[in-house]
Amino acid sequence: MAAGDGDVKLGTLGSSGERGGDGSPGGSGATAAGSSWAATLLATGGEMLLNVALVALVLLGAYRLWVRWGRRGLGAGPGAGEDSPAATLPRMKKRDFSLEQLRQYDGARTPRILLAVNGKVFDVTKGSKFYGPAGPYGIFAGRDASRGLATFCLDKDALRDEYDDLSDLNAVQMESVREWEMQFKEKYDYVGRLLKPGEEPSEYTDEEDTKDHSKQD
């Protein structure tokens, strides 16, 4: 073998000193690059998992709020009307109510329960499990519930003893009141208007009363 050939081979082996002990390219440099890549991947994956977890928590919170104020708030769901006094009460004829007249229908002085939303009075007797004296929303029975529903407040501060024109509510809160009004119309009988101070009640004919009730069925 010529000396020149040997020098070439030794030079080749020497240049491959950058290979790893197992003959793989890169050696310690490749190991460092691989570790950096793995760390980046783990950091990215961890951040993605954290974002997914946060989104899941937000969705869960929104769902719980909907369950509490949507389905439960309207007395919806299985068994909402079971053993309800509404089963033995005749349908109420349509009429208008003053605040004083409305308060008589609180579920304590009479089995029938009424409440008002955005100037409309609804018979919620079939939801007595929720709006009765022992119910979670019994504070609204016989009262104007508009402010409480708009502000998601179940305290007495959400109720006014005098007529509440809701003029201090903002646009978002008023939109919430209108949405609650529509939901109550879908679930319960609309029985008349809540009268402003000095306003005279309307006179409803039997035909108007029947027509209105037929929309509820």
Image (tube, rainbow, N blue to C red):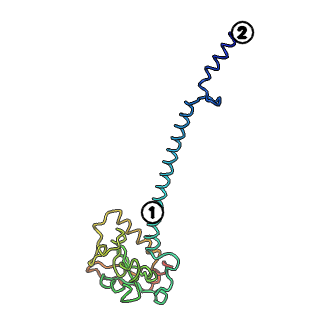
Secondary structure found at label 1: helix
* Label 1 sits on residue: 61
Q: In which quadrant of the rendered image does the N terminus lie? A: top right
Image vertical order of residue 150 relative to residue 90, above or below: above
Answer with left or right where residue 1 lies relative to residue 116.
right
First in sequence: mark 2 vs mark 1:
2
Secondary structure found at label 2: loop
Q: Residue at x 35, y 75 (%)?
A: 145
Image vertical order of residue 126 relative to residue 149, above or below: below
Give how far across and how far down residue 213 sits, in percent: 47, 81
Image quadrant in which you'd find residue 150: bottom left
Q: Residue at x 41, y 88 (%)?
A: 111
For badge 2, the amino acid type reads Ala
**Front residue (pair 24, 68):** 24
Give how far across and how far down residue 214 sits, in percent: 49, 80
Question: Which disc is residue 2 wearing?
Answer: 2
Q: Residue at x 53, y 42 (%)?
A: 41
Alpha-carbon span between mark 2 and mark 1:
82 Å
For badge 1, the amino acid type reads Gly
Q: Within 10 angstroms of label 1, few (less than 14), some, or many (20 or more) residues?
A: few
In front: label 2 or label 1: 2
Number of numbered discs on residues: 2
Q: Residue at x 49, y 55 (%)?
A: 53
